Image (cartoon, rainbow, N blue to C red):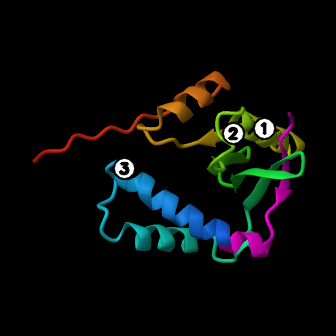
Amino acid sequence: MTVTLEPMTAERFVSWREHHVAAYAEEKVASGNWPAEGAAERAAKENAELLPQGVETPAHDLFIGVVDGREIGFLWLFTDPAPAAPEISIYDIEVVEGQRGKGYGRGLLEAAEGWCADHSIAVLKLHVFGFNTTAISLYESSGFETTNVAMAKRIR
């Protein structure tokens, strides 16, 4: 099974953005970063600021992950030009509902690594919410190392 990356079309971007904004808001609430009230609006604002030109936004590459002609997930890469050597950050990686547990997450990571190699990028980074132990396990088993840990304690 090989996951291939196809550039996201402007038409597909519309429904992906809607889904991504809702999922991101849920994750921010679940992680305790945001209150539920206003989370959807806040997520939509952040997304609009990051992708003001949609799929044409410079330094952002959005893909559909495909296996045997079937859409299995999404990948959003950001190329940070600030470091001496460009770095890629995974801003979103998701296997669609109904396709999870089949190895497609690992396939998307491998496709991202291949894309980086093709573009002479030596560092691939990502952020994962602490509650997402399934993703953390996947990333660690794929060779990602912890570089930072953010912690919080509620005082109430």
Q: Nearer the viewer, mark 2 or mark 1?
A: 1
Residue 152 in picture, x, y percent from top left: 28, 41
Q: Nearer the viewer, residue 128 or 40?
A: 40
Q: In the image, is 45 to the left or to the right of 92?
A: left
Q: For mark 2, what is the residue?
A: 124
Q: Nearer the viewer, residue 9 or 101?
A: 101
Q: Amino acid at mark 2?
A: Leu
Q: Nearer the viewer, residue 98 or 140?
A: 98
Distance between the Cα atoms at labels 1 and 3? Answer: 29 Å
Q: For mark 3, what is the residue?
A: 30
Q: Is residue 83 visible?
A: no
Q: For mark 1, what is the residue?
A: 113
Local SS, label 3: helix
Rendered residue at 73%/62% (across/down):
59
Distance between the Cα atoms at labels 2 and 1? Answer: 7 Å
Earlier sequence position, callout 2 versus callout 1: 1
Distance between the Cα atoms at labels 3 and 2? Answer: 25 Å
Q: Is residue 105 visible?
A: yes
Rendered residue at 47%/37% (across/down):
132
User: Are the residues at dot 3 and dot 2 in contact (C-beta closer than 8 Å)?
Assistant: no
Q: Is residue 16 magenta?
A: no
Q: Amino acid at mark 3?
A: Ala
User: Are the residues at dot 2 and dot 1 in contact (C-beta closer than 8 Å)?
Assistant: yes
Instruction: Find residue 53 and report its image quarter.
Output: bottom right
Residues in magenta, as a range:
1-14
Q: Amino acid at mark 1?
A: Glu
In the image, residue 3 sits, relative to residue 59, either above or below, namely above
Local SS, label 1: helix
Residue 37 in picture, x, y percent from top left: 30, 68
Local SS, label 2: strand
Earlier sequence position, callout 1 versus callout 3: 3
Residue 100 in picture, x, y percent from top left: 65, 40
